[in-house]
Image (cartoon, rainbow, N blue to C red):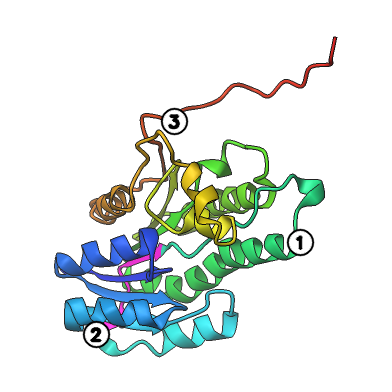
Amino acid sequence: MQKTVLITGASAGFGLACARLFAARGDKVVAAARRTDKLAALADEFGTSILPLELDVQNRAAVQNAIAALPAPFAAIDVLVNNAGLALGLEPAHKADLDNWDTMIATNCAGLAYVSRAVLPGMVERGRGVVINIGSTAGEIPYAGSTAYGASKAFVLQFTHNLNADLVGSGVSACCIEPGLCGGTEFSRVRFHGDAERAQSVYEGTTPLSSQDIADTVAWVADRPAHVTINSIMMMPNCQSFGGQAVKRRAS
């Protein structure tokens, strides 16, 4: 059955891969992002299957107005993919840039909450729908330099679990997908403020996950029968696993 899918951060990375996958299989896609040029290219490729939507998820009023104004063919959202998010910097907490922290919290936490709150009433009224939140392994597994980013993704995971507590029996469910090392996106380039060489070094000698791996998983969750809730999925490439605890040793 054809679905109507709203994807935030649809101009690149996971969001773009999800938009292409859903549109290619015949679903209707509201592709939301700040960069309209990328969205226009999507619409050129898939025609009327794509509704480009310029949207900054940090702007609560803009989110509410945009969802309320969706045209009838795209208004009944079956699948919400909360993908918009980012990491900025890798400094330890005592040296971190507070502007970076503010931006991560505003996008990864508040933005996700604003979009969810705008879409959920319609889903509950129709008695169907799934909210798929893109988290991160960083939300469960800490690593140095990820204080605010990891905390923001822990929010995403717990927000998802609490959605399911609120929505039990409604026909609407939520899932948090937590990717680990994933290449071929803008993630590390954004984190390092455009330093392409440093960004590329993150993936040297590895076969990381791809955006398509994430999109395939998103689609699988979206296609589960109505009686099935997938609470969370943690994904890593085979080259990555859990690390040992850090030990700081004194010089002898």
Q: Is residue 223 above or below residue 71?
A: above
Q: Are marks 3 and 1 in contact (CB under 8 Å)?
A: no
Q: Residue furthest top?
A: 252
Tag 2: amino acid: Pro
* Residue drawn at 84 percent across, 14 percent down: 251
* Residue drawn at 57 percent across, 44 percent down: 139
Q: Position of residue 100 (x, y in %)?
A: 68, 62
Disc number placed over residue 135 in the picture, else none: none
Residue identifier under label 1: 98
Mark 3 or mark 2: whose residue is earlier in sequence: 2
Marks 3/2: CA–CA distance: 42 Å
Residue identifier under label 3: 240
Q: In this rendered view, identify the residue nearer to me: 90 or 43.
A: 90
Q: Position of residue 209 (x, y in %)?
A: 35, 43
The local crowd at label 1, few if under 14, some if 14 to 19, many if 20 or more residues have their Cα within 10 Å, is few
Q: Is residue 67 above or below residue 181?
A: below
Q: Which residues are magenta?
A: 74-81
Location of the C terminus by quadrant is top right
Disc number placed over residue 73 in the picture, else none: 2
